[in-house]
Amino acid sequence: MGKKHIQPTLMMAMLCLLCSKSLAGQTEYAPPWTAHSENFFMIVMSLHAGNVQKLLPKGVEALANEDGMVATIFEMYDTGRVSGMPDYKIAFVVVEIRNLNSRDGTPGHFAIWGKTDSPESLEVLQNHFGFPYSLAENITVGKEQNAYTGSIGAPGKEMMRVKIEPVPEQPFTGEGIVNMVGLNGERNIVKSEVPYLTSGYTGRIVSFEIQPQGDPVLELIKNATPAWSMVSDNQIFSYSPALPTN
């Protein structure tokens, strides 16, 4: 995610125009859609390239740095306002991959894990974008005093609990493109370049507790060392239809 300064009014107008024009003639819940996420937070970490490659399909290669590590991002948020989709809560993990950069050079982000509480959004995210997400009956995202919090799983049996505090001295605004890549129902590699607009704060991770319960992705990130985090109450993004890459 970039950290460039932005012109919010211009970006909002662009996203609204994109959404309003593209929705005409689309079936219910099909992309494109635009969302404003609240209680958003992310954690950036690194995973060993060999471990990541085992989780990727044929034809998708992990983007490793000189130390053999792959940039990995965990995100969690709820959507307070959505155009084109029902509201939903979601948590997911993406890794950077080679050879599928966006038009502005952003590396591809390939989703390797995810949970959502919305059957409608899950259907689109799975079938259209090819993200390996699944339904979770218990997802909570919110605030506890000044900290952003999230959990997945029934109380007392959570597979994940997260708590992050904003660092008031480190605010930022930014815009850019998240280049999401997936493997759709026809086994085609597809991608959607997702413009976003954000303002928030660098985060301080209070806790990042994971009980993998046999999940191989959670087993990997459980032992990863977080490098950076952020929180935001103002995250706007717009998904376009996913397109084949070949």
Image (tube, helix red, strand yellow):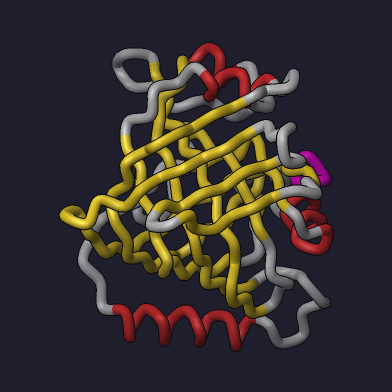
Percent x, y for residue 131? Answer: 69, 44
Residue 59 vs residue 36, the one in the foreground? 36
Vertical position of residue 145 compared to residue 184: above or below: below
Left or right position of 16 against 87: left
Which residue reaches farthest left?
A: 169
Residue at image coords 81%, 63%: 120
Observer able to see residue 227: yes
Vertical position of residue 83 compared to residue 188: above or below: below
Residue 38 vs residue 198, the one in the foreground? 38
Residue at image coords 75%, 55%: 117
Vertical position of residue 161 compared to residue 193: above or below: above
Left or right position of 28 against 178: right
Q: Is 36 colored magenta in this rendering?
A: no
Percent x, y for residue 174? Answer: 29, 62
The answer to which quarter of the image holds residue 78 is bottom right
Observer able to see residue 188: no
Residue at image coords 56%, 71%: 35
The quadrant the C terminus occupies is top right
Query: Taken as a whole, is the magenta stretch helix, strand or loop?
Result: loop
Percent x, y for residue 116? Answer: 72, 51
The answer to which quarter of the image holds residue 71 is top left
Residue at image coords 46%, 43%: 163
Vertical position of residue 34 compared to residue 243: above or below: below
Left or right position of 239 against 130: left
What's the magenta region?
A: 184-188
